[in-house]
Image (cartoon, helix red, strand yellow):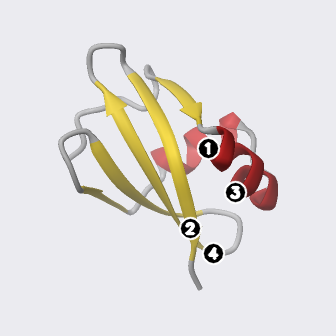
Amino acid sequence: MPIYDIDSCIIEPSKHFRNVYMRKWAWDTFDLRDAIKMAYKVDKVGKVKYEIYTRKGGGSKKIIAAYDNEEKTMFIISGAEGK
């Protein structure tokens, strides 16, 4: 179970994620928050790093994020798209 509360934390997408994945998927920050909220699987892969698996917009997607517990900020690093 993740330690973050997606409703109260700040979401900051990286420039790469914003320009590549959010544009390709036609998402804004509200869609990104909804996708993280509806995640069917969350893997903690490091001290502060998470792989978030979600299905939104007609396919499965993986979002890689880091969460800063002190600042209550989730920084979205990258993404991937599956079948």
Q: Amino acid at mark 1?
A: Leu
Residue 43's x, y, as percent?
26, 59
Q: Residues within 10 Å of mark 2 (few under 14, many from 20)?
A: few
The residue wearing badge 3 is 21
Lower sequence index among marks 2 and 1: 1
Lower sequence index among marks 2 and 3: 3
Q: Residue at x 27, y 22 (%)?
A: 69
Residue 24's x, y, as percent?
79, 61
Residue 60's x, y, as percent?
55, 73
Residue 45's x, y, as percent?
23, 56
The residue wearing badge 1 is 32
Q: Secondary structure at mark 3?
A: helix
Q: Residues within 10 Å of mark 1 (few under 14, many from 20)?
A: some
Lower sequence index among marks 4 and 3: 3
Distance CA(mark 2)–CA(mark 3): 8 Å
In the image, residue 73 above or below residue 51: above
Left or right: residue 35 versus residue 20 is: left
**Which label number is shown at residue 80?**
2
Q: Secondary structure at mark 4?
A: loop
Query: Do the CB atoms of the residues marked 4 and 2 lie less than 8 Å apart?
Result: no
Distance CA(mark 4)–CA(mark 3): 13 Å
Q: Amino acid at mark 4?
A: Gly
Q: Amino acid at mark 2?
A: Ala
Q: Secondary structure at mark 1?
A: helix
Distance CA(mark 3)–CA(mark 1): 10 Å
Left or right: residue 65 versus residue 13 is: left
Q: Residue at x 56, y 39 (%)?
A: 33
Q: Residues within 10 Å of mark 4 (few under 14, many from 20)?
A: few
Q: Can you tell which of label 4 and label 2 is closer to the viewer?
A: 2
The residue wearing badge 4 is 59
